[in-house]
Amino acid sequence: MLAPKRNKTMNTPTRILVVLPFSANDGVLAEHLCDFIHLVNKREQEGHCLLVCAGDVHDEMRAKVELAAKVAFEGVETITAAKVVDPNKNIHINRMFKTAAQHVISTYRTPWLWLEPDCVPVKYGWLDAIADSHYHQAKRYSGPWKKVMSADPVIFLNRVAVYPPDTMRELLAPLDGLGAFNIAAGPVVVPKSTKTSVIQEVAITDESTKLLPTTVLVHSDKQGIWMSTQREKFEQAASKKK
């Protein structure tokens, strides 16, 4: 798979577009993630970001996330998903993802990383490493695989993964369903994906949580534990750059 040429304009993002969704419940996490990305990148702007704002986010929180993203990334665009009133969490996630996927195919036409607010980069050069991993394999998707343990086990792609620009080809029906789209799409998507270890799905419980040597991005750090314990290390690295 050939990587697109680097370009500083927002309409032709560098190699892989970062798509960051956030709602009223995790807007603060999204803001903190952008701040941390800027620090991990040694306070340099890197890559392009599409923010997907849920319909329940108030203007002040939206502005805070946008500001943090504009500090961290070379280019930032914000789109808003229609507000959903439903107790089913899957419907909210599916709507956000579908909004992003429809916008990507019409505007960017490039592979994209679905980066949820409880993710955290753990190494300098994390975005390039994810891009390299994706472009050095031939399939449409790349990311961690997971399994639903049942009488008929289902292997599926973790939501935090790299998707092709026309992912709606496989995901249109699952995204309109009531269940988790990535689980429903597992039988179709997994054969078209490469299992990678640069992204690791693991609950961060404390600083002793074991990560794979190849991991550059972790999902999920819901309590911000990794950011808190590793901030000093990245602060020192950013200072040495100067």
Image (cartoon, rainbow, N blue to C red):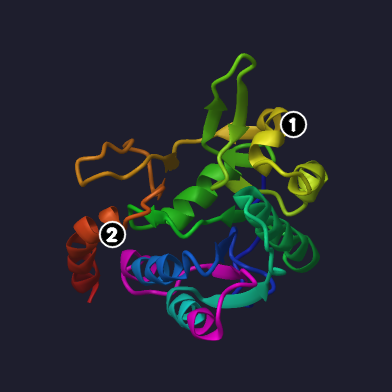
Q: Secondary structure at mark 2?
A: helix
Residue visible at 48% across and 73% down in the picture = 73
Residue visible at 64% across and 50% down in the picture = 88
Asked if 239 appears above or below 128 in the picture, the reply is: below
Mark 2 vs mark 1: which is more N-terminal?
1
Residue type at mark 2?
Met
Extent of the magenta region: 37-63
Query: Where is the N terminus found, in terms of image quarters?
Result: top right
Q: Number of numbered discs present?
A: 2
**Does 61 lie within the magenta span?**
yes
Residue type at mark 1?
Val
Q: Position of residue 240 (x, y in %)?
A: 19, 70
Asked if 201 appears above or below 117 in the picture, the reply is: above
Q: Secondary structure at mark 1?
A: helix
Residue count near mark 2 (Cα–Cα under 10 Å), binned few <14, some 14–19, many ≥20: many
Residue visible at 55% across and 26% down in the picture = 147
Q: In the rendered image, which residue does mark 2 sit on?
A: 227
Q: In the rendered image, which residue does mark 1 sit on?
A: 188
Query: Where is the C terminus found, in terms of image quarters?
Result: bottom left
